[in-house]
Amino acid sequence: MEELIQELKERIIDALNLEEMTPDDIDAQAPLFGEGLGLDSIDALELIVLLEKNYGIRLANPAEGKAIFASVETIARYVSEHRTK
């Protein structure tokens, strides 16, 4: 799981062009939206694309996204249970 969390941090930095950040700057338990990383709805769409492209995960219900994208740790948990790639 730790390896997946690290991989997700790197992919999030790439997908969202957070060049000034390193994976170590991202707390796996910190909120991604609002406080924490301060991501917005456009970033959420990028994360959905990232999950589809890299892990074969398609979010059918956008309402699920809020819980899944709460933190890097919640994304990692979801990916490990639902990945097809």
Image (cartoon, rainbow, N blue to C red):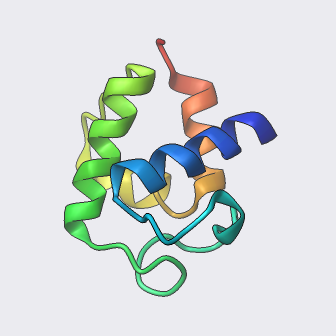
Residue 4 on image: x %, y %: 68, 35
Q: Is residue 71 above or below residue 79?
A: below
Seen at 59% across and 55% down, the residue is: 72
**Res. 32 in view:** yes
Residue 42 on image: x %, y %: 19, 63
54 horizontally vs 77: left or right: left
Residue 49 on image: x %, y %: 27, 38
Splitting the image into 4 quarters, where does residue 31 fall? Answer: bottom right
Seen at 63% across and 73% down, the residue is: 30
Q: How many numbered marks does the figure carry?
A: 0
Which residue lies most toward the bottom here? 35
> Between residues 31 and 21, which one lies in front from this camera angle?
21
Splitting the image into 4 quarters, where does residue 25 fall? Answer: bottom right
Splitting the image into 4 quarters, where does residue 27 fall? Answer: bottom right
61 horizontally vs 77: left or right: left
Seen at 36% across and 73% down, the residue is: 39
